[in-house]
Image (tube, helix red, strand yellow):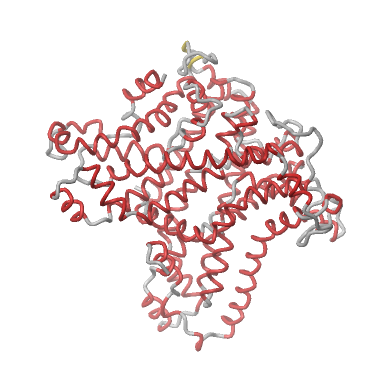
């Protein structure tokens, strides 16, 4: 069974994105024969992990051909017959698809707007704390949600916003009517983004705090001699000092823009909130695995992956040209 | 404390940013800012902890008080009956045991594969190294997607087996790069000397390199173990027999069953909405191992993230 899958994958593995197909030209002066003779033990170590990548990463990439082929459950994982762009046309003409696409963009943009800057703010605030015990305490507490399973987070969210939960108790105390938040489409984005912030803001400070410790303290002295107050020091010394970190994380954030927390949406949404909550990944999950339209769902998934790849490549290129920092 | 890598990293993080810290010349405005800052940070602490406290309070409360919205910080109608009820449910313990089995197996497989691949990738002279790195890194930015993965795992006959849980995500490229960065930082002289003494590559890895890598290995084991303990979607997707469910899926079905009628494939113990205190107890028991080890593992995670960042 395994070999049947790996074979086509091996043949095409160095394909997407990898230049060193031309590694045959003597880049390292050593011939492959000599290299194998000297390092054969290292090469043997590579076999199993490489097999993992070929089978579980590259074979599914090729598996995307079912977006253009008719797939029969139980048949070949690469489909039966070519159908051309049938499934692509299908989703382009599917109003549901464009609705979930819009939802994805909205949720992705909102998440980015809140989860990207807030860790920077928190890191700057932590940086002004003088008591190292207090600082350590706040950090330890704020990292905690990062270690929770998304299932637990979803469970907590649902308890908090349930009709008898804390949020509705506050609403009632302020004289309002209890709201069924989890079934109300107009609240879904708020719930999603706030729980996202709750879970990620503390952990997101780590890299900034690390970058802050590397700023040369002489820069602050010089700024003070020039008459800069604390705020001006922060603006002209601290922020430029952590700019490379900010850009790197921004690129990574943009790259995952389309992949908005699929698992969390899946756990938090329900048919009543589909109008705002349903995103591309959950839609294709239902189309593919609940309704068994594998090829159609694969076409949507391929489209999503390509957008993701394009986003990260362009974010990287733009930042390299404009600010000179990039991931590679 | 012990002089492992993580400790040193944490100390560096704790170090205040040098010459800025002189309280003598604080302006009045800055002193006010510091008070406000402390209050804001305490607010962050309260908001972060509140959901935990709330769940724990609910787990000790009687259902009546939860249903009427009276449980916030302290348990009302304190009792241990719910804990006894959940503890008496064999399905809960069975899923708990499944989680332990999946976590241990998956972590063992992951750590072996990641270590050997990272070790090979750290050998700068190796021909084809660029290609091997590229094969891994490319998967960070492009992946096959849900449907082809599902079709593949199905096609391999892994559905309803442990392999569907432990194999498809065996290597995390982020962890791989962290380990590679660590191996590259080891002095090459040690390995050269070992080679002269007649050790082959496998011997060098097992007897020279790994003993020097205990801190990074511990970090990696924790990374994988926590991720596996928390994961649910693989199991949700590929397992449909309730006796194979990990505790996260057990919990998910419990939560989903109570809130939406459309929970697909949810296996309910009883068709009626599951009461809030039972959910709370299940959540507390699921998260307990993580919270219990959290104070000890936190610094390993922080240092691991930073090791990874250095190389990015």
Tell me residue B153's x, y (percent): 49, 25
State which quarter of the image contains the N terminus of chain A: top left
The picture quadrant where one finds residue A276 is top right
Q: Residue at x 29, y 45 (%)?
A: B119
Tell me residue A213's x, y (percent): 41, 69
* Total numbered labels: 0
The picture quadrant where one finds residue B3 is bottom left
Tell me residue B299's x, y (percent): 47, 61
Residue A71 drawn above or below residue A160: above
Outermost residue on the bottom side: it is: B24
Residue A141 drawn above or below residue B311: below
Q: Residue at x 30, y 55 (%)?
A: B212
Residue B11 drawn above or below residue A196: below
Q: Is B64 on the left or on the right of B188, as rendered?
A: right
Tell me residue A19's x, y (percent): 28, 34
Q: Residue at x 72, y 49 (%)?
A: B281
Q: Residue at x 52, y 65 (%)?
A: A123
The foreground one among A31 and A281 is A31
Outermost residue on the top side: it is: A81
The foreground one among A106 and B99 is B99
């Amino acid at each position: 069974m395994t070999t049947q899958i790996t074979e086509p994958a091996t043949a095409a593995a160095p394909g997407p994105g990898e230049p060193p197909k031309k590694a045959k030209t003597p880049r390292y002066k050593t011939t492959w024969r000599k290299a194998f003779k000297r390092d054969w033990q290292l090469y043997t170590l590579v076999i199993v992990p490489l097999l993992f990548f070929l089978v579980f990463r590259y074979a599914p990439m090729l598996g995307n051909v079912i977006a253009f082929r008719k797939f029969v459950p139980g048949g070949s994982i690469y489909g039966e017959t070519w159908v051309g762009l049938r499934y692509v046309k299908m989703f382009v003409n599917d109003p549901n698809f464009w609705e979930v696409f819009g939802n994805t963009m909205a949720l992705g943009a909102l998440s980015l707007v809140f989860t990207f800057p807030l860790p920077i703010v928190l890191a700057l605030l932590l940086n002004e704390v003088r008591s190292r015990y207090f600082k350590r305490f706040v950090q330890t507490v704020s990292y905690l949600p990062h270690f929770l399973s998304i299932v637990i987070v979803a469970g907590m969210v649902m308890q908090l916003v349930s009709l008898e939960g804390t949020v509705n108790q506050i609403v009632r105390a302020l004289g309002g009517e209890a709201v069924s938040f989890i079934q109300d489409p107009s609240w879904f984005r708020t719930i999603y983004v706030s729980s996202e912030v709750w879970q990620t803001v503390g952990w997101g400070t780590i890299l900034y705090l690390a970058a802050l410790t590397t700023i040369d303290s002489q820069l602050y002295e010089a700024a003070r001699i020039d008459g800069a107050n604390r705020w001006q020091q922060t603006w002209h010394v601290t922020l430029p000092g952590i700019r490379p970190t900010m850009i790197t994380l921004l690129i990574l954030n943009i790259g995952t823009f389309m992949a908005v927390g699929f698992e969390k949406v899946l756990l938090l949404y329900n048919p009543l909130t589909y109008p705002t909550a349903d995103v591309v990944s959950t839609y294709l999950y239902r189309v593919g695995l609940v309704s068994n339209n594998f090829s159609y769902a694969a076409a949507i998934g391929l489209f999503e992956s390509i957008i993701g790849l394009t986003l990260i490549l362009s974010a990287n290129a733009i930042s390299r040209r404009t600010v000179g920092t990039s991931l590679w | 404390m012990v002089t492992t890598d993580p400790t040193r990293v944490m100390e560096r993080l704790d170090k205040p940013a040098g010459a800025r810290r002189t309280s003598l010349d604080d302006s009045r405005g800055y002193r006010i800012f510091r008070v406000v800052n402390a209050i804001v940070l305490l607010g962050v602490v309260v908001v972060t902890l509140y959901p935990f406290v709330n769940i724990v309070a609910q787990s000790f409360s009687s259902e009546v008080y939860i249903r009427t919205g009276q449980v916030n910080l302290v348990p009302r109608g304190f009792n241990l009956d719910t804990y006894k009820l959940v503890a008496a449910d064999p399905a809960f313990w069975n899923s708990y045991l499944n989680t332990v089995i999946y976590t241990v197996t998956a972590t063992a497989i992951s750590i072996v594969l990641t270590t050997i691949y990272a070790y090979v990738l750290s050998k700068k002279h190796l021909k084809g190294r660029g290609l091997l790195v590229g094969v891994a890194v490319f998967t960070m930015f492009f992946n096959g997607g849900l449907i082809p993965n599902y079709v593949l795992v199905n096609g391999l006959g892994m559905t309803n087996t442990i392999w569907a849980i432990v194999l498809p995500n065996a290597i995390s490229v982020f962890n791989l790069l962290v380990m590679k960065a660590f191996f590259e930082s080891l002095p090459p002289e040690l390995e050269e000397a070992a080679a002269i003494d007649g050790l082959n590559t496998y011997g060098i890895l097992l007897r020279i390199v790994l003993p020097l890598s205990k801190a990074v290995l511990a970090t990696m084991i924790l990374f994988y173990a926590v991720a596996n303990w928390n994961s649910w979607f693989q199991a949700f997707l590929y397992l449909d027999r309730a006796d194979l469910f990990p505790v996260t899926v057990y919990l998910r079905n419990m939560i989903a069953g109570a809130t939406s009628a459309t929970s697909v494939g949810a296996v309910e113990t009883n068709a009626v909405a599951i009461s809030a205190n039972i959910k709370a107890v299940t959540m507390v028991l699921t998260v307990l191992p993580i919270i219990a080890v959290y104070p000890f593992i936190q610094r390993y995670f922080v240092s691991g993230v930073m090791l990874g960042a250095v190389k990015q």
